[in-house]
Image (cartoon, rainbow, N blue to C red):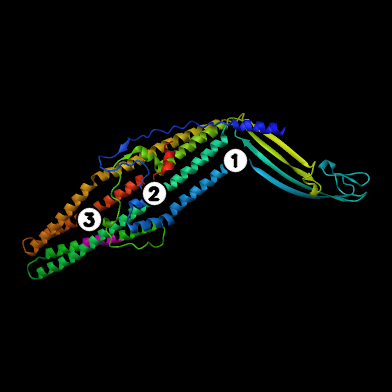
Amino acid sequence: MRKTILLLAATALAGCVSLDPSYDRPDAPVPEAASYGLEGPTVTDAGLGWREVFQEPELAALIEAALENNRTLRQAALDVERARALYRIQRADSLPNIAASGAYSRDHYGSNASAGAFGTPVVTGDGETDGGGEATGGQSFTIERYSATAGISAFELDLFGRLRSLNRQALEAYFATDAARRSTEVALVSAVAESYLQLAADRELLAIARSTVDNQAEALDLTTRRFEGGVGTEVDRQRVLLSIERARIDAAALAAQVRIDENALRLLVGLPQLPTVDDSATIGDVALRRELPAAVPSSVLLGRPDVLAAEHRLLASNADIGAARASFFPRLSLTATGGTSSTELDALFGSGTGFWSFSPQVTLPIFAGGGLRGNLGRAKAERAQAQAAYEYAIQTAFREVADALATRATIADRIEATDRLADAAALTLNLAERRYEAGVEDYLSVLDAQREDYTARRERVAARLIEAGNVVALYRALGGLAPEEEMRLAER
C-alpha cells in the first residue's frame, strides 16, 4: 500500500506543468542608439561607477556618508529584506510541512467507571482493567499513555503549477525590489552630487556679489571725492548708491540660498552636521570625470536598475496569470500521520505499538460565481499594465540619455562663449573706469559696464554648473547598470 501511494505521488509530481504564458520580451519602443555625432567611446557593457565619475575627495566623502546614513535608501534596503522574506514564505508552501509531536496523558477513573466509548480501558466485573491499567475490585484506578507522532499536513501536489507560478511571482517581486533599491542608490548618489555642485555654484555667486559690493564701495568713495572736489555730480554718487544696494540684495539672497543648499545636502547625507566642506571651492574646481561615453545603444539601457525592476514586475505579473489559470483545475492535497502509542514508556517504540493514517483530498472548483474568471481577467490586465510600465521605463531611460548627450554636444561651445563674454566684459569695465577717472565719460557708462561684467561672471558660473550637471546626468542615465551576470539576465 505504501509503495503504491509513493509511486502515485511521484508520478503526479513528475507530471506537474506550468500554465504561465510564454514570455517574449517586448520590443524597445526607442531608436537603436543616441549619439548626436559626438566623438568618443560607445557604452557596450556595465555602466559607470560613482567613484569613477565623482573624483573630488570631498564629494566622495559626502556620497559615502549618504549611502550609509540616508533614510530613504535604508527604507529601500528594508523593502528588499521584506520581499525576500515574502518569497521564503511563498516557497515554503510548495514544500511538505512535516511536524512531530510527543504526548503524555494520565487519566483517573472511579471504581464504577465505564469509559469504553471514549477509548479508555473498561473496568471488568472482578475489578481488573482491559487495556493495561491497574485496578482492584471496587477501587478507582489510573491509566498512563505515551505517544509519539509525525506527519504531513495538507501538502498540495502542484499538479498544474499553481504553487510554482506563485513562487516565480514572489521571486520576481523580490528581484524587482532589489533592482529598485539599486535605482534608489543611483538616484541618491546623483542627488548628492547635484546638491554639492549647486552649493559650490551658489557660493561662487555669493563671492561675486560680495566682491561687487566691495568694488561699489570703493567707487562710492571715488565719486564722493570727485563730487566734493567739484568734478563729479550728485547724480553719479546716487547711481553708485543704487548699485551698491542692488548688489547687497543679491548677496543677501545668495547667502540664504547657500544655507538652503547646505540644508538640502545635510538631509541627503543623513547626518546632523555635514563633513567639512571647503567654502572657497568653486564649481570649476570640482574634480569630475570628463571623458564620458559619446554614444549609447538602446539595448544597453535594458540593464538599468529601473528598467530591470520594471521587467521583473512584468515577469511577476506573467507568473500571476499562470497561478490564476491553475485555479480552474483540481487541487490534490495529502495529509499523512504515523507514530506509536503505548501505556508504558519503555514499550513506546516496541512491536505492535505503531499506527498510521493517510488522507488524500481532491478539491474541484464547480461554481465560484465568476470569481475565477474575474481573477484571471485581473491578472491579464495587471500584466498589460506592467508591460506598458516596462516600455515607458525604457523610453524614459532613452530620453534621459538623449537629453544628456544633446546637452553635452553643445556645452563646449557654451563654455567658450561665456569665457569670451566674461573676458570682454571685464575689459570693457576696465576701460570705462579709466575713461571715467580721466573725465572723458560720466559714471553711467561705468555702471553699464559693471552690470555687464556682473552678468557675464554669473553666466560663466551657470555654464560651469551646466557642464558639471551634465556629467551627473550621464551618470544617472548610465550608472548602476547591471553587472555581467545581471546583464545576461537582461538579455534572456
The residue identified by callout 3 is 458
> CA separation, marks 1 and 3?
64 Å
Residue range of the region highlighted in magenta in the rendering: 245-255
Residue 24 appears at what percent x and percent y?
44, 32
Q: Earlier in the sequence, mark 1 or mark 3?
A: 1
Q: CA distance from mark 2 to mark 1?
A: 35 Å
Mark 2 nearby-residue class (10 Å; few <14, some 14–19, many ≥20): many
Question: Is 241 above or below relative to 423?
Answer: below
At a point 71% along the width and 36% down the height, the residue shown is 358
The residue that disc 1 covers is 93
Secondary structure, mark 1, is loop
- Left or right: 412 with respect to 320? left
Secondary structure character of the magenta stretch overall = helix
Instruction: Specify the amino acid type for callout 1.
Output: Asp
Residue 86 in view in this figure: yes
Asked if the magenta segment contains residue 249, the reply would be yes
| Amino acid type at mark 2 | Val
On screen, residue 17 versus residue 404, left or right, reads right
Quadrant, the N terminus: top right
User: What residue did someone put label 2 on?
Assistant: 186
Ranked by sequence position, the earlier of labels 3 and 2 is 2
